[in-house]
Amino acid sequence: MSKLKLILVLVFAAALTAYFTLDLGRFLTLSYVQSQLSAIQTYADENFLSAAGIYFLVYVAITALSIPGAAVATLVGGAIFGLGWGTLIVSFASSIGATLAFMTSRLLLRDWVQSRFGSSLKAINAGVEKDGAFYLFSLRMVPVFPFFLVNLLMGLTPIKLIPYFFVSQIGMLLGTAVYVNAGAELGQIESLSGLISLPIVLSFALLGILPWITKGILGFVRRQKAPVKFAKPKHFEANVVVIGAGSAGLVSSIIAAGAKAKVILIEKHRMGGDCLNTGCVPSKAIIRSARIADYIKRAAEFGIDGAKGQVNFPKVMERIQSVVKAIEPHDSVERYTSLGVECVAGEAMITSPWTVQVGERTITTRSIVLATGARPFVPPIPGLDKVDYLTSDSLWDLRELPKRLLVLGAGPIGCELAQSFARLGAQVTVVDQAPRIMPREDEDVAELVMERFTREGVRVLTGYKADSFERDEQGGVLHVQGEDERLALPFDKVLIAIGRKANVEGFGLEELQLPLTQRGTIEVNEYLQTIYPNIYACGDVAGPYQFTHMASYQAWFAVLNAMLGGLKKFRINYKVVPWATFTDPEVARVGLSEQEAKEQGIEYDLTRYGIDDLDRAIADGEAHGFVKVLTAPGGDRILGATIVGYHAGELLTEFVLAMTHGLGLKKIAATTHIYPTLSEANRFTANAWRSARIPKKLLPWAERFFRWRRG
């Protein structure tokens, strides 16, 4: 413990000890103050500055030490100094004292509380970072919680010191004035008849209606958060306009049409969005071709000699396009039109919260759902614009396999495509400035994938920062800087795969002054509303998870809330979020990883089962990987599950179901799984959890019992 913390602890301990031992609380009662009021007022009249200074310091001490009695002290200030001076003195004293209590709480407790309960406080921290000043202003205006409790609790949050002081000063001003005024009137009482005087009655009436006054003020402030005002149409052509026909937009549209709402879907490019055309579908198709190529190389393992195969890269890419075309009808204009969705091709421009312009047509709508998706992020690396770089959007136009492929980024997209191109015959180098590949996953997970990459000839350079590109006759060169060395990496083609950027430009958000998050996504609340109550956002453009299945999940909440228009609200939650990286071995996860649990200070029990011992995995020649489950200490409630291995994405579903519906490992252990299947790995993991909890002390007694039963 630092010296400052130790001093603060000793000061608080001494103050509290003195307060209770010496019964100092009796001096902070209204009856005591009234008994001494005449003498105090006389002293204040004769020594105003001295009296004001003493009162100021005592008030600061009361509030800084979180001693009960601030309300009585405020009334006393009004009684002694009157409304004007009393309000001025109390206002600054209370704000300074509150800030000192806030700083003390932050210094002594915040680090411990955040490390111990970080995961539980994540939503609160995010809310305070976003609207902390408004929350504090609300609490100061309407004292739902005791004054001292607000100081202590706010000290545990990320709100900054200076905003805390000024918001407290402004927020408490009205309440302070009302209390001081009541105290000023109490100071005039000379007889019992004074208790029913008009000023006294009005002062206490103000105290009673203060919450209603402040509620109106807060409502006015909240309504001003939407910065631009527009005229609302009297009639609407549509109930919902959806902008973007990717996963989020398609699901939003089909739900609205299914509910018989009038829905108009606007798409400027291709139906199906990135997932169908440049993302999930084509990437899984190339992964499949690459796996077949790898199986041919491994044919001898399965007793097949002489198997040969030559990669015909143009045919591989043509197959990918045929897969896209086979799925295209599922997302086509014809299908959605038949389901009751009006599909409009063109660029949407939001001209007000209720109007969307497409070409010459102006559409009026009750609500708007923004589902504009995201695109590959291209970093501002010097020289990149001089090389013919690829992204996950443009990659699918290739018809010649690059001999040397450089992949910048070792996240899910980079790892999936790097392994696929290596299996198809390219010399692949992966570069990332992170210390290891797949940094969001646990270290043992990344190690297992890295072992496979090394075995298959994928060169991985982690801990290297991309400095600059230069073009040459073959393609280009990337200069990277490591901790101890600088390298020049030649390539024929370079794939930029370091993340995705939300599409928030070019359709009117700037004019609406719609705020964005630090990640560049549209800022939404728990109902997926923007600052305009009838405009919603879902999918990659809203975040925080840029997965197709999460876009569909968000779409359900966004469009339902949009259709109902506030009559009923559905709050989204992200307690169970699964995802998978389709490398070989696959990596699938839901809930907490070990890495996250340690970072957030969450206690857990770990159960691990090695898939190399699973009969079906052995029979399929895929005996590698593991299942890892985190459970709450002392119980079987699942906090998170990670699977690394063959078809991990399919196996994870059982844990997703269990976490969604509150089922523990005991239920999985008690469920019959077909033999021989990969899904048995989940049951064996649950059995391993149960076996580890057999009370071993009872086993000798069980042995004696069964020996007795044998006679």
Image (spheres, rainbow, N blue to C red):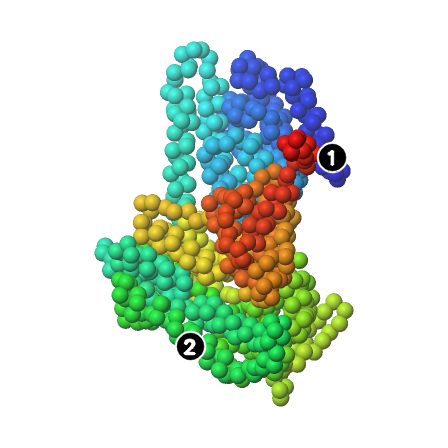
Q: Secondary structure at mark 1?
A: helix
> According to the image, label 2 marks what residue?
322
Q: Is residue 652 above or below residue 461?
A: above
- Residue 418 can be seen, yes or no: no
**Above or below — where is 313 with respect to 195?**
below
Residue at image mark 1:
6
Q: What residue is rendered at 41% in x and 36% in y?
A: 214
Tell me which residue sits at (65%, 73%) in the image: 456
Residue 325: % across, % down: 39, 75
Q: Position of residue 255 (x, y in %)?
A: 33, 56
Q: Looking at the picture, how far across and down is residue 465, in whole percent?
A: 67, 69
Tell me the quarter of the picture where residue 449 sits: bottom right
Mark 2 or mark 1, whichever is nearer to me = 2
Rendering quarter of residue 390: bottom right
Q: Secondary structure at mark 2?
A: helix
Identify residue type, mark 1. Answer: Leu
Q: Residue placed farthest to the front in the image?
A: 711
Regarding residue 321, the answer to whether it shows in the image is yes
Q: Residue at point 30% right, 65% down?
A: 336
Lateral position of residue 178 relative to residue 702, left or right = left
Closer to us: 611 or 273: 611
The N terminus - image quarter: top right
How many neighbours does mark 1 have within 10 angstroms: few (below 14), some (14-19), or many (20 or more)?
few
| Left or right: where 519 falls relative to 13 | left
Question: Relative to residue 326, is residue 61 depicted above or below?
Answer: above
Disc 2 marks a residue whose amino acid type is Ser
Residue furthest bottom in the image: 473
- Crowding around mark 2 (Cα neighbors within 10 Å: few <14, some 14 to 19, many 20+) is some
Number of residue marks: 2
Q: Which of the numbered marks, if any, corresponds to residue 533?
A: none
Q: Is residue 236 above or below residue 25?
A: below
- Along the polypeptide, which appears first: circle 2 or circle 1? 1
